[in-house]
Image (cartoon, rainbow, N blue to C red):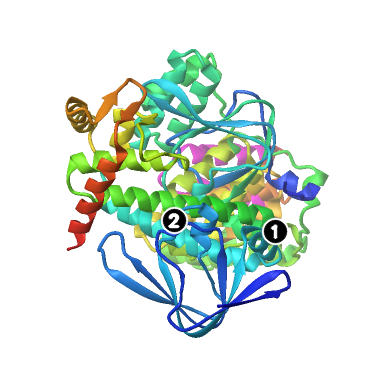
Amino acid sequence: MLELDEKFFARFGVDYSPNEIIFCEYEPGYEFYFIQKGRVKIVKIINDREKTIDVLSTGDVFGEMSILEEEPRSATAIAVDVVRVFKFHRDNFDTLLQGNPQLAYKLLLIFSKRIYDAKRRLMILLLEEPSVKVMDVMIMLAEQNPQFDVEGEIIINTTASQIASWAGMADSEVQKELTHLARVAKIDLFEDRIAVKNIRDFQRIVTSRRKNLYS
Amino acid sequence: MAGGMQGGIITRSYKSGSIIYFENDKSEYIYILKSGRVLLTYTKIDTGEEIKEDVRQGEFFGVKSALGKYPREETAQTIGETLVLVLTLADFERLILKNVNVVRKMLRVFSNQLRRIGKTVRTVLGDSDSVSPDVELFRIGEHYYKAGDLTKASYAFKRYMEYYPDTDYAKVAMDRIKSISSGTVSTSSAGTKTVVASDSDLDDFAMDDSPDDMFSMDDAVSADSGGTGDSEDFTLSSELSSEMNDFLTDSDDSLDDFGDFSFDEPAAETSSGLKARFNEGVAHLDMNNCSAAAAVFQEIIDEGPPVKEHEKKFFIDSYFYAGRCFFEMKKYKEAMTFFAEIIKNYQDGENFKGTLFYIGDIFASAGQKEKALAYYNRVLNMTPKDALNSRALDKIKGLQKS
């Protein structure tokens, strides 16, 4: 928790009522938020449905990408109940760190993770063949569950369009690859998930293709 | 390898050529190089190039993979007899909580890395794969609108209008906002507001009432009769600036509200997206969120003039809008600081006329009728004529009656 004086709160504290949008996907954003009280859900509209990606609560940080990026918001933040946040413009970042080392540590964790994810995605994007990209997205999604067992069948909760966005491909192209993989019995396709029969196969293929990239 | 304890933290000594960890190892230890040499070897993702990097003494290594709990991305090998401190995550947390500067430095390094990766990702994607944010924002509005979640719909449409007012769906978005709020659209604008001078308005600043300081339009013009419009402007502006300097001499600390804002980032890095930020400030002001708006404009100003030519307008206009913010908050002295910049340096800007008008308003509020008249007159005589000219005339008539 941030422990800050009244003056600080007067300047940076903002209250939201239940169901109020804090920021909206695709709007420009220059602030990041630190939850003081209440819960905030992070949602995206996918296929015209509001899908909850995460629910955050007291002590959590969100919108932190705005510290680094000029990109529009990548998701919508909505107050679940009465929410009090500190809202910081990225230009106040240094001042903020000075008084709040815990926040600093938390941000280190968040960024470490994000750098890894970004690199991992880059590795997918750099692959040349569409079919290999699709496989590597599935490997990456599988890796996100640290307990995943390479020996057995793996269930990945994802859709063709999510894979497409990771791989930087068109939905239809991914759909084609997935259909093919299903036809040769490498995977089973469901509406909201994919069952991968033998992820090791995919890992072998991807590793060898990646090696060839550099040679 | 020998071990020892130092303040609860383990010190390890390695012989030359020892591997501290291998790429793809999983471990939660973080290291600090105490003495000797450590070489990190990793493969660049995009080129496959093998990179070797020396750790400097006193520097951390193995931080990201330990914190992020993912496999090591590099191999760490010693050269010569080497001493390292080995920290657990708990040690690390304890240590950095006492050294925020270290964290800040790391975050900067991390953010640069992330930025670089992000840049490569965008390059690989051809930079144009992304959807256009304006259309998508509108779609989100539509989603909530159709779902009957009008608060959210209204939010999305309003943001759409704020950031993308000139785009395809502006009219539809506007109609939606109107239908949601059943036709009540806020029209708060500083220009149409009646300025009521009161004693409390004067609290913020000290006025020099000596007749010498009186500014008269006639004097300025006669001092330069026969001159061109430009030189008249010059005379006027130098008069104005000296007058404003007087106005500002009695400094107080009110602007120090911004004193603890920090602007470490070089201007070049933060100035992109200037337009959006500027619009954000305007939006705040439109919603009467004056102090938030002022902070935005102050930030833009403090970053200094942008490099990109087309962004200069927003920088200059920020003075005008910052002035307006403080004007709205009745902090006339602060307002004057910003307006003075326009008068001194940016007479060509499109808000020069508006600035003169506001200065008139400020003097009117301060009960300085003569000065107010001078400024309103100046507005009145400016071409091309627009609504501001007639508003100036109204103001003059009003002042003459009083």
Q: Tell me if residue B104 is in the magenta stretch.
A: no
Q: Position of residue B67 (x, y in %)?
A: 55, 56
Looking at marks 1 and 2 on the same chain, the residue that comes earlier in the sequence is marked by 2
State left or right for residue B387 relative to residue A15.
left
Q: Label 1 to label 2, Cα distance in Å?
A: 49 Å
- The residue located at (51%, 40%) in the rendering is B388
Q: Position of residue B260 (x, y in %)?
A: 68, 61
- Amino acid, disc 2: Pro
Residues at marks 1 and 2 on the same chain: yes
Pointer 2 indicates a residue of which chain? B
For the magenta stretch, what is the residue range?
A: B371-398
- The residue located at (72%, 69%) in the rendering is B8
Residue B255's disc is 1
Count of labels in the image: 2
- Amino acid, disc 1: Leu
Which of the two residues, A23 or B322, is positioned nearer the viewer here? A23
Residue A135 seen in the figure: yes
Dot 1: few (<14), some (14–19), or many (≥20) neighbours within 10 Å? few
Residue B236 seen in the figure: no
* Residue that numbered label 2 is attached to: B71
Q: Position of residue B114 (x, y in %)?
A: 43, 56
Q: Quadrant of the C terminus of chain A?
A: bottom left
Q: Is residue B314 above or below residue B82?
A: above
State left or right for residue B146 relative to residue A185.
right
SS under mark 2: loop
Which of the two residues, A79 or B371, is positioned nearer the viewer here? A79
- The residue located at (80%, 47%) in the rendering is A6
Dot 2: few (<14), some (14–19), or many (≥20) neighbours within 10 Å? some
Q: Position of residue B344 (x, y in %)?
A: 53, 64
Q: Tell me if residue B377 is in the magenta stretch.
A: yes
Pointer 1 indicates a residue of which chain? B
SS under mark 1: helix
